[in-house]
Image: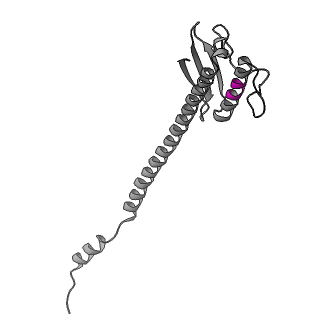
Amino acid sequence: MRKRNSSRALGSISSSGFSLVETLVALAVLSIGLLGLAMLQVQGMKFTNESYFRTQATVLAYDILDRMRSNKVGADAGSYGKQAAPITGPPTAPSTCGDLGNTCTGSPDLAAYDLTRWYQSQSTLLPGATSSITRVDATSTYTITINWKESNGTDAKQSWELVI
């Protein structure tokens, strides 16, 4: 009868397959990697949301600037904001003169319409939006400041000093 080499048989058995410890270590490393990937995804979404709000604020600032440029008489008269008293909210009597079928009677009426629509756009596009338009000096330089709430609850602010 032939004798088997017992040390050789044991060696080949122990080297085949993974042990439970190796499997748990591999699972732990994979879990940490997936958690890191999830955190990167969350941060990316946060930064995308913040940049979206900043872009909307910039678009809104240039929107009111273009409206002021098209109504230069009303802007020069201080209908959009004065040096000592900035405009910080929509007109008390919202104007509908620019809506379909309605005509504006003058530059102050058109300015009230522009401000009404601008503040409506802010409330639609930016959460918790507040803003102000201030005339910097006797020239046609204005400071437009827009504040809003970020998705994490912090306040964000962006200001532009623009010449019409």
Quarter assignment of residue 139: top right
Q: Nearer the viewer, residue 65 or 30?
A: 65
Residue 54 in picture, x, y percent from top left: 55, 31
Seen in the picture, residue 64 relative to 13 is either above or below; the reply is: above
**Quadrant of the frame with the N terminus:** bottom left
Residue 76 in picture, x, y percent from top left: 63, 12
Seen in the picture, residue 76 relative to 96 is either above or below; the reply is: above
Tell me if I can see residue 89 in this picture: no
Which residue is found at the position 45% from the left and 53% from the top? 31
Which residue is found at the position 52% from the left and 39% from the top? 48
Asked whether, in this view, residue 91 is left or right of residue 82, the answer is right
Magenta region, residue range: 113-118
Tell me if I can see residue 160 in this picture: yes
Residue 104 in picture, x, y percent from top left: 75, 24
Colour option used: one colour
Residue 25 in picture, x, y percent from top left: 39, 57
**Quadrant of the frame with the C terminus:** top right
Seen in the picture, residue 85 relative to 14 is either above or below; the reply is: above
Which residue is found at the position 67% from the left and 27% from the top? 118
Q: Nearer the viewer, residue 34 or 121?
A: 121
The mark tally for this picture is 0
Asked whether, in this view, residue 104 is left or right of residue 152, the answer is right
Magenta stretch, overall SS: helix
Quarter assignment of residue 108: top right
